[in-house]
Image: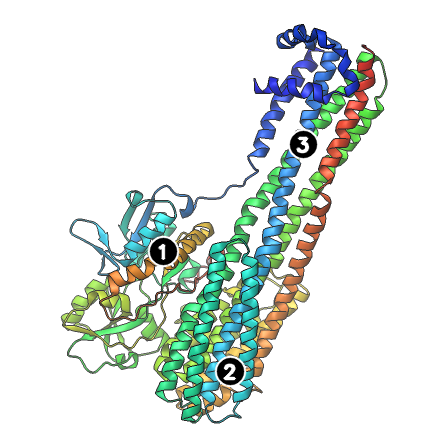
Amino acid sequence: MRVTRSAAAAAAGTLIALTGTAACGLGGGGETSVADQRSLRIGVKQDQPGLGLRGPDGAYRGFDVDVATYVAGRLGVPPSRITFMTTPSSIREKALADGTVDMIFASYSITAKRKTQVTFGGPYYVPHQDTMVRAADASIGAVRDLKGKRICEVTGSNSWRRVIEERKVAAEPVRAETYGQCMDLLSAGRLDAVSTDDLILAGFATSATKIINAPFTDEKYGVGLRKNDLKGCEAVNRALTEMYQDGKARQLLAKWFGKSGLKLTTSVPQFEGCSYTPPAKAVHD
Amino acid sequence: MPAGTAVRHAAPSGRAPEAAPARPPDRRGPGLITFARGRWLRTIPGRIRAFVVVILIAIVALLAVLAAAIGNARDSVQTIGHDAGPQVVATGTLFSALSDMDAQVASVLLIGREHDLGIGHDGALGVYERRRSEAGAAAVQAAQLAGRDPHLRQRVQAVIDGLGRYERLVGEAMVLDRQSAHAAGEPPKQVVDTYRRATDLMRLELLPQAYNLTLDSGAAVRQTYETKRTAVLTGRAWVALTGVLVLLLLLAAQVYLARGFRRLVNPALALATVAALALVGAGFAELSAQAGHIKKAKMYGFDSVLALSRARAISNSAFADESRYLLDPGKADTYEQTYLDKSLAVIYPDLGDKPVNLESYYAGLEQQAGSYRPGKGDAPFLGFFGDEASTVRPGREADALGRTLQAYRAVQRNDQRIRQLAGSGDRTGAIKLRMDRDRTIRDFNAYDAALRSLTALHQGAFDSAIEAGDGGLRAWRVLPPAAALVIAALTVAGVRPRLAEFR
């Protein structure tokens, strides 16, 4: 009977261990998500005044940067554990897919096409596309007047498509790497107009240029996340809801765009929703 | 040490009261020393008692594991079936009602003094009033469902407050509209300006808030499904494990008693074994069934109801953008772009290298939604209906999806015609077509009805899965403790006569 005795003792021990486990709750796990990370690498723009601009000290400043900092805070990541990185328009999808960055806050418009490659939290703001011309230019008053004019086509940006493809305005696209470059081309007379989001244009406004104030789209600035990070997407949306509820959004908008004369919306935008996207078919570029 | 304590405390209580005199009170001191040295295990009654205690602990463990797993199943059914599910319906109704209110206001202002155009001035006002009371009822229901969550209630309240402001602005626009008595499609600037304030409030504040509430319910369900359903399945494995342990211990007790006392079968212990087997088997089966109900409720019910509610909300607001496009030429480009954006959310055809604009959209939609046969293979398009196409089951669901797609194409064909007319300068023709009760309005209503009946099928699948889950769980409130009690009693009853032999 010695065998039985030791077996019984072992069984008793196991059972107590088992009961303990059961009491702790039978929880399930999940994949890694921005919602669970201790530190975050966040992609922003480095050359868009008001949104994301890298100063001589190497620090990034702007509305996107402040919103990113707020959201990261709500996800439990303090500013000391955030690493900001530059993600130009042309590499945003790739940077998320290969894990170079965890999140992107870089005037990143949610479009049906991009949604096949990226999961978007937010939008955190809905700007409108408008057009900037040289101050002396009176020939452009609306988007249709861009017919035959030279406009800026920034690699990876959607704005020129809104004019040429969606509105079918036969403007002539001139390539540039960044909106900063577009502005140089505009003042040098090698471009007639820069048409993009009013928040971007506001940051570049000088006395030599003017915004024609003829908005013709609703853009949706989304938080770019790794495809199908639904948990992260939901957490980001909760954070953004709080940002609008507690008045932080109003404060940040006033801080960065209060003097621009833009009409600012201070209520929470309609979110895109966090749904599973099947693997993209090769045909969507 | 905790193990020893547990055994020591459990031992007297696990024994039947009649067995107590086996250790008279005057021998208590030496008894404790014997206990501490473990000498009690060397006596046969001591071993039997220890065995019984171990079995009882195993039964308690089984009960705990079973209760935890059933509790997780109950949480899932509660969240998915009774909180989030109805909340999606309530907030979806709220969105549609709000969106349609604004669309009706646009119609009234477009019609102007030509009161008999389309559904007519009074007709549009009547629909507006009905939608207003629907929105009110849905908001009240959403607030009730928000229950104890103060943040959620606050957000529902914000929509209700905004609705009051919206109605004031609409009232103002209506008065200005009546005073100006303008021709159809030519509201004066002050009417358009007041309407802009109203519609901006609706489009930029109220509708987003209502839509985000729907999304929240979706998030709650996804989280519950991910964590709780996994927990139910893990719990099921634990039930099997502890169940097998209880059975082995009961069998071991049977063998021990049969050998030690030269008896064939201990009937009470045998009954306890059968009862334990039944409990474990039934528990395992019930947890499997619950996991199945939860999965069914989500995959074939909730996910589709959510996607289709969103599709309906987005379609409603796109349809309103179509009339805003005519009402407010100053913002026509924006309304055309938002219309395209919303249409792409509903169905995103594979446009290949073609530019993303309405022209490619109409063509892609005709070609791809036209050739697609629901329930037979993958859909060539994405968007809400693409999601629906990937989960739709052949039969009634596939047929209903087919009808919805067909109706959606009719809506888009009308839109194409309206924009052609407006683009060629025939605004009156465009407005007449937009207001046409026998074409544009009829087709949109047919699409809405098809979409609602498709949603109703999934709602039915959802309701029956939740009902099955509820029904199963009701019995499992009392069953596990009752069964555990019976098994424990039978075990004790089986051992007691053997212990009595040592008195």
Q: Is residue B242 left or right of residue A229?
A: right
Of residues B196 and B318, the one nearer the viewer is B196
User: Residue at 42% of width from left, 92% of height from top?
Assistant: B179
The residue closer to the viewer here, B35 or A240, is B35
Three-letter amino acid code of the residue under disc 1:
Glu
Q: Secondary structure at mark 1?
A: helix
Instruction: Please give the chain letter of the residue carrying mark 3.
Output: B
Residue matched to label 2? B414
Q: Is residue B371 left or right of residue A135?
A: right
- SS assignment at label 2: helix
Q: Which residue is mark 3?
A: B62
| Mark 2 touches mark 3? (CB < 8 Å) | no
* Dot 2 amino acid type: Asn
Locate residue B399, reporting x and y percent. Answer: 65, 69
Mark 2: few, some, or many residues within 10 Å (few <14, many ≥20)? some
Depth check: A110 or B168 in front?
B168
User: Which class describes the residues within 10 Å of circle 3: few (<14), some (14-19), or many (20+)?
Assistant: many
Label 3: which secondary element: helix
For the point 35% across and 87% down, the residue is B189
Which residue lies at the image location 54% right of the left edge and 79% below the top edge?
A: B129
The answer to whether residue B443 is above or below residue B68 is below
Height in image: B443 above or below A80?
below
Callouts 2 and 1 close, C-beta under 8 Å = no
User: Same chain, marks 2 and 3?
Assistant: yes
